[in-house]
Image (cartoon, rainbow, N blue to C red):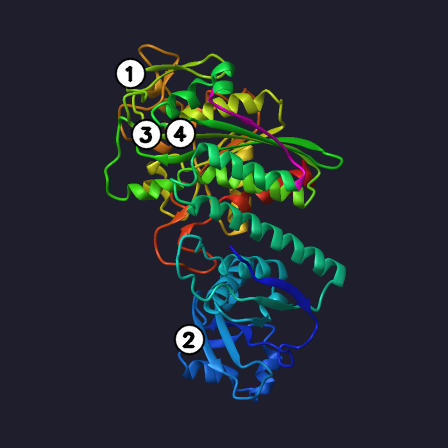
Amino acid sequence: MSAPKLSLTTTSAAEATADAVIIGTVQDGEDVALAPGAEQVDVAFGGGLAGVLSTLGATGKPDDVVKFPTMGRLKAGVVVATGLGRVEEVGPEQVRRAAGAAARALAGTRRAVSTLSTVDLHAAAEGTVLGAYAFDEYRSERGDGPVGRVDLVSPAEGTAKDHRATLRAAVVIGEAVSAARDFVNTPPNVLYPATFAERAAALAKPAGLEVEILDEKALRKGGYGGVLGVGMGSSRPPRMVRIAYRGPKARKKVALVGKGITFDTGGISIKPASRMEEMTADMSGAAAIVATVVLAARLKYPLEITATVPMAENMPSGAAYRPGDVLTMYGGKTVEVLNTDAEGRLILADAIVRACEDEPDYLIEAATLTGAQIVSLGRRTPGIMGSDDFRDRVAAIAKATGEGGWPMPLPEELRRDLDSKLADLSNATVHRWGGMLAAGLFLREFVPDGLPWVHIDVAGPAYNIGSPWGYTAKGGTGVPVRTIAAVLADIAEHG
């Protein structure tokens, strides 16, 4: 995937040499008004730009984009007016979304200049990178491609050095999200455990990270019963990838874990055929974790971070694990399999125990774990579970990033539904109630007491099955890369 080149400029948008000028619009009561940064462009139109936009049908609502020719009033040939929503509600997420919508509308354009950066430079840059994203690797005709370059007008406040640092951080985060999207969007006949591991290593090693790949022999020798059990039905054997980053003057140690089911048929407990193709995204948690640890290295977070990423393909075959099997997990705990479609928690359990052997100060885990998350919270709001204080801290940060998240409980009365007649616990309940919470309770069984930990269920938010909106493309979204990156930055700052 190619991405636009972003740079800062102190040149007025009205004087900039570009193919297009991006300005923001807002809803001011029933009228459309101009967002900050558009003043000089408005002067070029004799102060009547809002009226022109109103005539053209602009509303200022989110995802509202209106393009019109400048007729020689500016050096640029086109004005792109993108909506930020109600004037009293404009914040970073509104700027990010407006920048993304504008970037999508400018596909095939060579150069644009944006005034959204005068409202929020980080959000404008991040939204531009994400909105320009397109995955066309497997198309014979690739279309126009993203906008080639976007010059961001420097904000009036702050120093040039600060602005450069802000822009770089935003671009690195945007590129990490795009990398996660690329992993998710790669078809499962191309991205399976072995190739996923290779691609993860190829992304991590140039950033100076240490990479260890455990193949099926190493997994068997190590006693990783969950990963091996889930992966035994496929002709493509499982892997576990460990990626280590040791930052300068590291203040805390953080363990990251992500679910890497490269395709999920449900195994013997096979899923319905309808929409099974979306199960190519069942490795979104792993994609986010790999991309985020690389991001942390590029931005030199003062942390020690180790990512533990189990990878398997859940297939039905004569060799597949069965309902009724008992698996011995890494660390010795036994699990009775009631449903082979509750496979993600099995590979995560192995990874969590291994990750906690490093004695981290925090554990963060991400997974497309349960359809119950979509039933409970919809397709855009992750469910966040874990130790109470850390869960609430992560949920608040998730909302601030724009990825969203809602803190969910782990009710003790649901834990007994995971009791097994044969083993230490079962991998599913015999009823459908509280499925997302039961999965969180299962994972908690493998987390050491007292360790601040969080589980982020992104079954819906990780994959957009609808039309593009804001900075979110169809297909892989890269959620929750930005949330985890923000949590890591918060830990680096506050401990």
Q: In terms of sequence position, does the residue under pointer 3 or pointer 4 come before the other?
A: 4
Tell me the number on the disc at residue 315. 3
Q: In terms of sequence position, does the residue under pointer 2 or pointer 1 come before the other?
A: 2
Residues at marks 3 and 1, CA–CA distance in whole angstroms: 17 Å
Circle 2 is placed at which residue position? 30
Residues at marks 3 and 4, CA–CA distance in whole angstroms: 10 Å
Q: Tag 2's secondary structure? A: loop
Q: Quadrant of residue 39?
A: bottom right
Q: In terms of sequence position, does the residue under pointer 1 or pointer 4 come before the other?
A: 4
Q: Amino acid at mark 2?
A: Glu
Magenta-drawn stretch contains 208: yes
Q: Are marks 3 and 4 in contact (CB under 8 Å)?
A: no
Magenta-drawn stretch contains 296: no
Residues at marks 2 and 4, CA–CA distance in whole angstroms: 58 Å
Circle 1 is placed at which residue position? 324
In this view, the mark in front (2 or 4): 4
Q: Tag 1's secondary structure? A: loop
Q: Are marks 2 and 3 in contact (CB under 8 Å)?
A: no
For residue 84, say whether it is visible.
Answer: no
**Residue drawn where x is 57% and y is 62% of the image:** 4
**Relative side of 370 to 207, left or right:** left
Q: Which residues are magenta?
A: 207-216
Circle 4 is placed at which residue position? 236
Q: In terms of sequence position, does the residue under pointer 2 or pointer 4 come before the other?
A: 2
